[in-house]
Amino acid sequence: MRKRAIILLALLVTGCATITKGTTQTVAVDTPGVPGAVCTIQTQNGPQMVSTPGTVVLSKGSAPLPIQCTKECYAMGSSIIPSGTETMAAGNVVFGGVIGLGVDAASGAMNKYPDIVTVAMMPDQTCQQPVAPRRAPRVSNAK
């Protein structure tokens, strides 16, 4: 009887993350009109950087994540990536019960970040971008 209980428990625990889509998520980051900005996301595992437009893989969690984007001649753009509940977490109560729900809560699998994060950035009016040097016209020696 004890062996059956252990096998059943193992099935419930391993199945819960599959039902709720795993413990990581790919998130697209964009700074509209400002390609090439470098964004830093403060995660529970340390800072993660992405150049826009781009994607980053985040470990799911219940905490919102601060994001800051920088680019020369632009004011820093800041935002918060909110965390919500994965819709599949409700199905875990049916299939995984309290144990499965607890595992998903502990692993972060029941949480979800938005699929796309947009950070607004404004031009810095005081910044003067360096002007690229002009090339001299090419002289041809063809006769």
Image: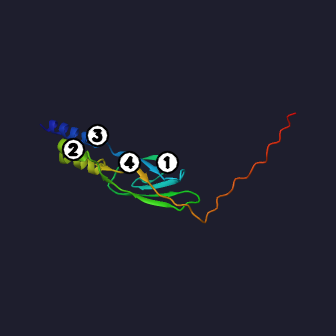
Mark 4 or mark 2, earlier in chain = 2
- Residues under numbered marks 1 and 3 in contact, where contact means CB atoms less than 8 Å apart: no
How many numbered circles does the render carry? 4
Going 20% across and 47% down the picture, which residue do you hit?
99
Label 3: element kind = helix
Q: Which residue is outermost to the left? A: 1
Foreground residue, 128 or 84? 128
Q: Which residue is mark 1?
A: 53
Q: Which residue is mark 4?
A: 115
Mark 3 or mark 4, earlier in chain = 3
Mark 1 or mark 2, earlier in chain = 1
Q: Which residue is mark 2?
A: 91
Left or right, 72 with reference to 6? right
Q: How many residues crowd mark 3 within 10 Å: few (<14), some (14–19), many (20+)? A: some
Which kind of residue does numbered mark 2 sit on?
A: Gly
Q: Which residue is mark 3?
A: 18
